[in-house]
């Protein structure tokens, strides 16, 4: 099974991506991870990507698509995969369709006000990076794992969160329309517990 996973910041995409990949025994491919891997290993395409990043420029779509194409050609993708963070725009979606046939595009749908509440209430460990939410901290200000200070990241303040949401919606609506026209879009209500959302996904793509 070959799946594209869409979801706004705060929709729980990482958690559900891990669950889906385990359930269907497919590899979870995060574009952030494969960028970092190629740059760290100094592959040819990694060097190209790094040259843009070092200048503070966006990596061109063509380079991103090539990094993904090379990753999908690896042996562990033969039984299927879940793409997380790609495609991000219509150009990338069309290039992906030239590379392979996608079975499902799962869109994790959460009301915007819920997403904003999730993100603005997030606190992150300053050392290990573990995330918490103020609703469940009971006044604690240190990490359960390493006892380091919890911080409120600057990009989790309301103005930044609202701006990120607007950018995400503008980027993603053409993708949703594209996959809907292909007949492979699955909208999943991602407002609920992890188990509830897992069950909805399971029912939607069984």
Image: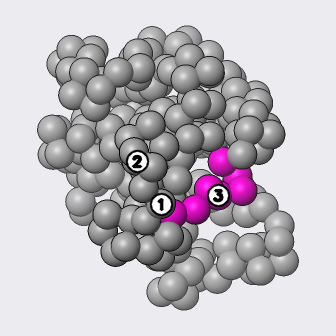
- Is 170 included in the stretch rendered in magenta? no
How is the protein colored in the picture? one colour
- What residue is shown with label 3? 153
Foreground disc of the pair 1, 3: 1
Residue 155: say if magenta. yes
Residue found 43% across the figure and 65% down from its top:
142
Residue 141 marker: 1
Q: Residue at x 21, y 28 (%)?
A: 195
Q: Position of residue 161 (x, y in %)?
A: 71, 40
Residue at 47% x, 24% y is 107
**What is the count of numbered marks?**
3
Quarter of the image for the C terminus: give it. top left
Sequence-wise first label, 2 or 3 = 2
Cβ atoms under marks 2 and 3 closer than 8 Å: no
Viewer-nearest residue: 201 or 75: 201
Pick the front one: 117 or 149? 149
**Mark 2 and mark 1 residues within 8 Å of each other at the beta carbon:** yes
Q: CA distance from mark 2 to mark 1?
A: 8 Å
Q: Which residue is mark 2?
A: 137
Looking at the image, residue 193 sits to the left or right of residue 60; the answer is left
* Residue 172 position by quadrant: top right
State whether residue 166 is above or below residue 155. Answer: above
Q: Secondary structure at mark 3?
A: loop
28 lies above or below 205 = below
Relative image position of residue 146 (x, y in whole percent)? 34, 74
Q: CA distance from mark 1 to mark 3?
A: 14 Å
Q: CA distance from mark 2 to mark 3?
A: 16 Å
Which is in the foreground here, disc 2 or disc 3?
2
Q: Nearer the viewer, residue 82 or 136?
A: 136
* Stretch in magenta: 150-156
Residue 163 rendering spot, x and y as whole percentages? 79, 37
């Amino acid at each position: 099974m070959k799946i594209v996973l869409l979801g706004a910041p705060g929709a729980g995409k990482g958690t559900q991506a891990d669950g889906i990949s385990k359930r269907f025994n497919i590899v979870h491919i995060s574009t952030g991870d494969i960028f970092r891997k190629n740059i760290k290993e100094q592959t040819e395409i990694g060097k190209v990507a790094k040259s843009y990043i070092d200048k503070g420029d966006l990596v061109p779509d063509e380079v991103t698509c090539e990094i993904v194409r090379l990753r999908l050609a690896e042996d562990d993708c033969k039984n299927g995969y879940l793409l997380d963070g790609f495609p991000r725009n219509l150009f990338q979606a069309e290039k992906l369709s030239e590379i392979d046939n996608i079975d499902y595009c799962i869109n994790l749908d959460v009301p915007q006000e819920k997403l904003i509440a999730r993100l603005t209430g997030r606190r992150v460990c300053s050392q290990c990076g573990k995330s918490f939410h103020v609703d469940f901290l009971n006044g604690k200000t240190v990490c359960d794992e390493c006892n380091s200070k919890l911080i409120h990241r600057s990009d989790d303040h309301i103005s930044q969160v609202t701006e990120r949401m607007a950018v995400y919606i503008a980027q993603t609506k053409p993708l949703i329309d594209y996959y809907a026209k292909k007949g492979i879009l699955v909208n999943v209500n991602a407002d609920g517990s992890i188990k509830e959302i897992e069950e909805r996904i399971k029912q939607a793509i069984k």
